[in-house]
Image: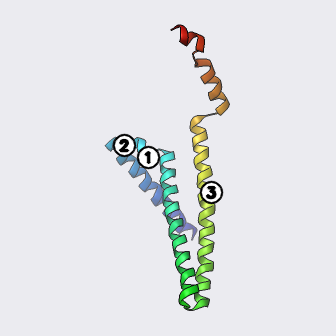
Amino acid sequence: MNKRKNAQKKLINELKKQLLVQAERLGVRDLYTPLALEEMRLDALRKILTEFYMERSNLEYELNMIGSNKKELLIKLERLNVFILRAQVLLQQKLEFCQKLLDKACGDVADVRRAVKRIEIPAKVQAAA
């Protein structure tokens, strides 16, 4: 199992490198920053989570209205709820990671505020100009 996961990771990393090379050649490298890639992952995760919610809604409808094999539907619902919980946790982790990337890009907020105060033109000087 570990060999398979490692092989998949290597393949994904190689595809990512090739994507970045092609983006560089096309002059759109700025569209594939680490933050942009994380946003793409977030969008995909939200889409998957929406699909899970729709499937859960369909299963609940089938369970309540149609009266199919209830045992089988309950098992499917339990499994689906586990997938939904995993996706929600992953979404939260990705959101926190994006926030860390933004914080890293912005730097220390206190330092930024001090720098802005240093370079701000005082109101009296602006009025005189």
Between 124 and 55, which is closer to the camera in this rendering?
124
Q: Is residue 56 above or below residue 18?
A: below
Q: How far, Cα to Cα, is label 2 from label 3?
A: 29 Å
Mark 2 nearby-residue class (10 Å; few <14, some 14–19, many ≥20): few
- Whether residues under marks 1 and 2 lie with C-beta atoms below 8 angstroms apart, the answer is yes
Residue 84: percent from left, percent from top: 60, 69
Please tell me whether mark 2 or mark 3 is closer to you in this view. 3
Q: How many marks?
A: 3
**Left or right: 47 in relation to 116:** left
Q: Is residue 13 above or below residue 7?
A: above
Residue at 58%, 88% in the rendered image: 72
Residue type pointed to by label 3:
Gln
User: Which corner quadrant holds the N terminus?
Assistant: bottom right
Q: Is residue 113 above or below residue 79?
A: above
Between 128 and 110, which is closer to the camera in this rendering?
128
Return the residue found at the far top: 128
Task: Please tell me which of labels 3 and 1 falls first in the chain.
Answer: 1
Please tell me whether mark 3 or mark 1 is closer to you in this view. 3
Q: How far, Cα to Cα, is label 3 from label 1?
A: 22 Å
Residue 60: percent from left, percent from top: 57, 80
- Whether residues under marks 2 and 3 lie with C-beta atoms below 8 angstroms apart, the answer is no
Residue 117: percent from left, percent from top: 63, 21
Residue at 57%, 67% in the rendered image: 2
Mark 3 nearby-residue class (10 Å; few <14, some 14–19, many ≥20): few
Residue type pointed to by label 1:
Tyr
Residue assigned mark 2:
28
Residue 13: percent from left, percent from top: 47, 55
Residue at 58%, 19% in the rendered image: 120
Between 120 and 91, which is closer to the camera in this rendering?
120
Instruction: Indicate the secondary structure of the residue bearing disc 2.
Output: loop
